[in-house]
């Protein structure tokens, strides 16, 4: 199985900050990398697919980049509704997820 | 707009079989080329992919669960289902169903709201 490692595991930031979360795959996955946001008690929500494609309806302050083994999710200017847990996910079978990054208010 | 809704018992006894159904609304489960997946999340932990079924019936399972998992589809009811046998407390989790919009690159959208299944006697 392909292991996905996110860093950091938790992050404190303020409204308006620029935030970057990284995800590393244990082997190359081309651009088969997706990002989700999950709020407490809710299902994950797709933000970015195929490494850099913004899902319809997702604010443009979210962006994704990378290929091969190293990927990033960037939030350009944090809004109050962005405080949540973020997961990366690779698409090769068996699909695997990163352990999550909890983004908290500073 | 396609919506998914999980249903099934919230409590299952150890060694028994967990059975859940995902009902798809707002579109036909057999229209287009989609995979339909199950994913679970133990309380306070990360996400684990269980498996998927193609509209025409082929399946893929997580090797860690493969010996205990069956995913099936009932197009007449616009539903797909999960069966997980010989459950233990480690199978206690929120179970989500989700659609895979692109058969060449698995991402999940939309998701159901999730249903909590507790394994306990």
Image: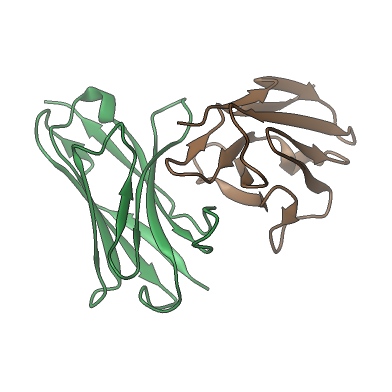
Chain colours: A brown, B green
Tell me: residue B14, above or below residue B62.
Answer: above
* Residue B111 pos. (x, y %): 47, 55
A45 with respect to B27 (left or right): right
Residue drawn at 30 percent across, 31 percent down:
B64
* Residue B59 pos. (x, y %): 30, 55
Viewer-side residue, B2 vs A1: A1
Residue drawn at 60 percent across, 36 percent down:
A87
Q: Quadrant of the C terminus of chain B?
A: top left
B36 with respect to A74 (left or right): left
* Residue B110 pos. (x, y %): 51, 59
B94 with respect to A45 (left or right): left
Residue drawn at 62 percent across, 47 percent down:
A32
Tell me: residue B76, above or below residue B61.
Answer: below
Q: Quadrant of residue B84?
A: top left
* Residue A71 pos. (x, y %): 73, 36
Viewer-side residue, B106 vs A102: B106
Residue drawn at 45 percent across, 72 percent down:
B33
A14 with respect to B2 (left or right): right
Tell me: residue A2, above or below residue B60.
Answer: above
């Amino acid at each position: 199985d392909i292991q996905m490692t996110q860093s950091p595991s938790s992050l404190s930031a303020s409204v308006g900050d620029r935030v970057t979360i990284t995800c590393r795959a244990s082997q190359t996955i081309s651009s088969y990398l997706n990002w989700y946001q999950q709020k407490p008690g809710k299902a994950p929500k797709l933000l970015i697919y195929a490494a850099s494609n913004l899902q319809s309806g997702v604010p443009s302050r979210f962006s994704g980049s990378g290929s091969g083994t190293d990927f990033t999710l960037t939030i350009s200017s944090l809004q109050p509704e962005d405080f949540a847990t973020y997961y990366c996910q690779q698409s090769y079978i068996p699909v695997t997820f990163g352990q999550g990054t909890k983004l908290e208010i500073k | 707009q396609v919506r998914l809704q999980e249903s099934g018992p919230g409590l299952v006894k150890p060694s028994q079989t967990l059975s859940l159904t995902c009902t798809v609304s707002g579109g036909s489960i057999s229209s287009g080329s989609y995979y339909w997946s199950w994913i679970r999340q133990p309380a306070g932990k990360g996400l684990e992919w269980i498996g998927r079924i193609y509209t025409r019936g082929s399946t893929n399972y997580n090797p860690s669960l493969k010996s205990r998992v069956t995913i099936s589809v009932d197009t007449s009811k616009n539903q797909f289902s999960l069966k997980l046998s010989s459950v233990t407390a480690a199978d206690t989790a929120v179970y989500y169903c989700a659609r895979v919009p692109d058969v060449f690159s698995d991402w999940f959208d939309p998701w159901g709201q999730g249903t909590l299944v507790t394994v306990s006697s």
